[in-house]
Image (cartoon, rainbow, N blue to C red):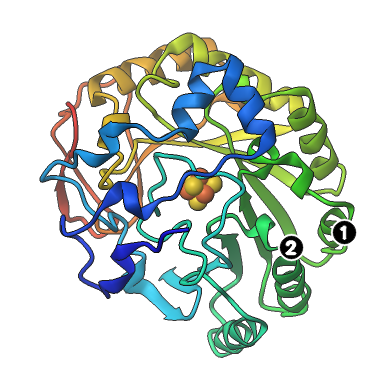
Amino acid sequence: MKKNPANRQKKSTNNLDYDPLGGLVFKVSPHLEELAKRSPAVRREFYPSAEETRPTSQSLVDPLLEDAHAVTRGLVHKYPSRVLVLLTMTCAAYCRFCTRRRRVSDIEAGNITLEDIEAMVSYLESHQDINEVIFSGGDPVTVPRLLIAAINKIKKLPQIKIIRVHTRTPVANPTLITPQLLKTFRSITKQALYVSIHFEHPDELTPITRKTVKAIKDTGAILLSQSVFLKGINDDVEVLYNLFSELPMLGVRPYYIYRCDPTIGVEHFMVSFKKEVAIMTELRKRLSGIAYPTYVIDAPNGSGKIPVPLEFWEFKRTNHTDFLDKNIKIVGPK
Ligand code: SF4
C-alpha cells in the first residue's frame, strides 16, 4: 500500500501540492466486487477513474479543517459538547469521493493504540462539557478490537450521554459486523447508541446488507443514514426516492444528505447546486417527513452543517453564512 503524501504536510494542508490518486489506494471487498459487476453506480463509487487526477484550483486537501482541531492522537474536538474519535484510517473499501482521502487508507498514519485510547479518555475526563462521542475514521468497524475496547471504556464515563458509530461496513463488507461487536452494542445501557450508516444508492441494499442492518437494529441502536450527492450515482430524483423510501422500512432514519465537499480528486463527483436543490424540492413533495433527510453544506472552514433552503423559498444560490456568521461563497458547479 502506498502512503498518503498529504500526511507530510501538517496543519497547512489546503494546497494542490498533493497527488490525489496516489493518496487513496484502491480496495474493494469480494461483496462489492460482485455487486459492482451488476451495478454501474456501485462501480463508480469504488473504482478509480482518471478524473481523480485533475484537481481544480478551488479544491482543498482538508476542506473541513479537521486536522487543525486534533487534540490528542485520533481525537478531534471541533464542537463544544462532542468529539470525533478517528480510530483508524482503514475502511472495508475505499469510496473514491471520500472527503478524508488525504488520510484514509494510510494505515500507518491512522494506527491508534490502546495507549491513545487512554489519552482520549483522560481528555474526556478533563473536559466534562463533552457528552457525545462519535466513532469514525476511516471505518471504526474495521478495527473491532479497538472499537470494542474504546466503547467499553467510554460507556463507563458518566458525562457521556450519546455514543455514535459511523460506518459503511453494512454496505462495503457486511461480514465485519460480528456477533462480538453486536454484543458490545447491546451492552451500552447508560447511553443512547446511534449507528449512522453511509448509503448512496438503492443498489447497495442487497439481502445481506438488509440482514446486517436488522441485526444492528436488534441491539437497540437507533439507526441513521448519511449520504452525499454524487454526480452520475445518485443525482436523480427516482434514485434518491427509492433509497430514502426504503431506508425507514429497514428501521433507518435518513439523517443527512451533504453537498459533496470540494476535496482534491473528488470534484468530478460534485453535482450542480441548482440541480441538488431541485431534486431535494421534488423529494420533499413526494417523501414522508420520516424519510426525508436534512440537506446540508458542510461549511468549508469546518464551522457547521448549513441547511440549504428549497425552491419553496426565493434565495440566492451564491453565498451562505456559517455558524460563526462568516459569509461563504458556494464552491463547485452552480
Ligand atoms: S467508508 Fe467513509 S471514510 Fe472510508 S473511504 Fe468511504 S467515505 Fe471515506
Q: Is residue 156 visible?
A: yes
Name the residue: 57% across, 52% down.
91
50 lies left or right of 174: left
Query: Label 2: few (<14), some or many (≥20) within 10 Å?
Result: some
The percent coordinates of residue 323 (x first, y second) are 29, 56
Under tag 2, what secondary structure? helix
Under tag 1, what secondary structure? helix
Name the residue: 13% across, 33% down.
318
Q: Which quadrant of the view contains residue 262?
A: top left
Quadrant of the snapshot with the C terminus: top left
Sequence-earlier tag: 2 or 1: 2
> Of 19 and 278, which appears nearest the observer?
19
Residue 180: which disc? 1
Question: Mark 2 sits on what residue?
Answer: 144
218 lies left or right of 42: right
Q: Which quadrant of the view contains residue 15?
A: bottom left
189 vs 226: above or below: below
Q: Which quadrant of the view contains residue 229?
A: top left
The percent coordinates of residue 169 (x first, y second) are 66, 44
Q: Are marks 2 and 1 in contact (CB under 8 Å)?
A: yes
Query: Label 1: few (<14), some or many (≥20) within 10 Å?
Result: few
> Of 162 and 275, which appears nearest the observer?
275
Indicate the amino acid at tag 2: Pro
145 lies left or right of 62: right
247 vs 87: above or below: above
The percent coordinates of residue 330 (x first, y second) are 18, 38
Residue sitting at the far left: 57
